[in-house]
Image (cartoon, rainbow, N blue to C red):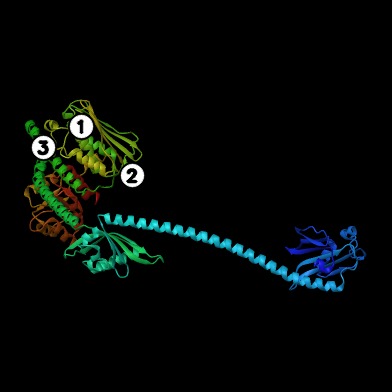
Amino acid sequence: MIESAGATMGALILAEDAQPRLKTVGIIENDTIIVRHKNSRSLPVAASILQYVWRTQETVALDDAGLDERFQRDPYVHSTRVKSLLSGPIIKQGVLLGVYYLENPLAAGTFTPARQEVILALATQAAISIENARLYDELENRVTIRTQELSTVNQDLENELAERNRIEKALRESESRFRAIVESMLTGYLKTELVSGKILAINTAMLNILGADSSEDVLGEPSLNFFSNPQERNQLQEMVLKHGRVTRYAIKIRHRNGKILDALTTSRLLYNTDGEPSHIETTMMDVTELNSAREAAEAATRAKSAFLANMSHEIRTPMNAIHGIAHLLKHTELNEKQQDYLLKLTQSTNTLIALIDDILDFSKIEADRLELENEVFSCRRIMNQVMSLLQFRAEEKGLLLKLNIPAQLLEWRKGDALRLTQVLINLLGNAIKFTQQGEVHLELYSNNTQLTFAVRDQGIGMTTEQIQRLFQPFSQADNSTTRRFGGTGLGLSISKKLVALMGGDITVKSQLGIGSQFSFTLNLPLAPDQMHTSANSSDAEQTLTFAGKHVLVVDDVAINRLVARELLSLVKITCDEANNGEEALNKLLSHHYDLVLMDLQMPILDGLEATRQMRARGDSTPVIALTADALESHKKTCIDVGMNDHLAKPIIPLQLHSMLKKWLIDQV
């Protein structure tokens, strides 16, 4: 372009970011065009002319630039005295791509119209070339960017593939471990398809339960074929679909040999990748032998309970007569020798009753049939009662019996007063039994709801080895202890179990020849203070009168009726007698009674049925069950048929007195 125009210098200015940027400068030196590539915003040309062309997109052709009023003040024009100058736009499809700039500083009128036409044609070609170059550069940049993107994608794919391979390997290893675990399980494993119920996976333990020789025998077979009752399978599947997991569900399975087995299953629902239920996974245990053993154990327990009930009845029936008549003898005139005999008889009777109670309590505890009560009681009163009951025994041996209760004790608590009393009587009775001289202490320490009961003695003491076997049933410290002091060895075992049932534990500290301490701590919640309702209760009981009350005694054993009649007469109560339930019903039709004392086991009509018929015909007379059966289950049976309360034989006068007060005075 420089040569065709007759210029000595030319420049190409291109648009970059919408701003002019000098790209190339060409100079003719010694008939040779020297091209210098630049990339600068500084322009070594007539800036005002260039800006004019850039702004107006018009061609400027000057024969002598210094004479043109528009540009003669341009610093470049003024300093270089340039003559001929030609500058025009490079346009492609209406878009300014750049500006060409030509000059000849020596000759005027260099750029004739003919040369301008040539330059215009060259500028048009330059526009095409520049646009093509720009497109090429843009394409090359896009290719570069796309290549980089593809490289990144390829790397990501390689990483993803490597991660997928790692996960697949981990899954294969996990599945292999899972299969090994399932195969080694002692319980059966089964995986079935949800819709068809077909067996898809099974382990050896499950094959043994079903009686199959190999997995090939059952894979693909519907699991329904192995259910004794198809309805059970449908119910199990419905429960699994509803809850997602069902544990310890009892079903019956049909063995290949036709035998019906009892099984416990745990099943869970499995889902496919779309989150939809697809399979059921089941573990199963054959409990046929276990159920048979349980049924045998339950039968043995029922037989044991029946035996205990019968033995209790057979033993307590004569004991009721012995104990009752001994008590009646106390109210007759006796000489000193007779009183001594009666005292020994009473003590032996009480010992025998305690032994029977211990055996029955031990049996109930062992069978987990002992239930605790939760009633309001006074700790202070219980401890005073225990001291009163055992005071005479201590005085007989010349022992000093001491009671230590905090003065500010919050005494009203909730718990099982009867069992607490039983434990304290046992511990304090043992302390008195094994102490020959000195003191025995019954102590109570309080820390809010935590109450610590302790019994200390100055008795024979024990070694560490003796303490270790102390709480074993039918065991004492050693055989010589049994021979010397007597006893069954059941008391401490029962006491420890009772304390455990109440949430505590008996601890022992002892030194041989010095003494022992037994203590236990119970959490007994506070109850409302009821002191004002119970003050001087013992005095009040002594002044109670039952004169005018009429009681019906129903028992098939004549001596039991005699004992009951005489005990009632001591408190001014008149009574009638009936030999069985049928006689009792007839007497109730023709007489009014304030209370009925009803034996349970009688010929013709027993006490339970008699009471049921009483209630059926609208008779609301209070009925107290008199029974030699001390099992707790019979208490509930008595209440269920309409009896109001329960009194165990042998009849203890103090317990009878409390029962009479409750139903003849308190309930009126």
Q: For the residue carrying disc 3, how many other residues have a C-alpha within 10 Å: few (<14), some (14-19), or many (20+)?
A: few
Task: Describe the element under mark 2 as helix, strand or loop.
Answer: loop
Judging by the rendered image, the residue that carries numbered circle 1 is 465
Dot 3 corresponds to which residue?
348
Q: Residue furthest right?
A: 67
- CA gap, disc 2 and disc 1: 41 Å
Q: Position of residue 368 (x, y in %)?
A: 21, 48
Residue 551 visible in rendering: no
Q: What's the amino acid at mark 1? A: Glu
**Mark 2 or 1: the one toward you:** 1
Residue 283 lies, with reference to residue 525, above or below; the image says below
Of marks 1 and 3, the one in the foreground: 1
What residue is rendered at 23% in x and 34% in y? 387
The residue that mark 2 highlights is 527
Label disc, if present, on residue 119 of the rendered structure: none
Query: Where does the N terminus fall, quadrant-wise?
Result: bottom right
The numbered mark, 1 or 3, whose residue comes first in the sequence reads 3
Q: Amino acid at mark 3?
A: Ser
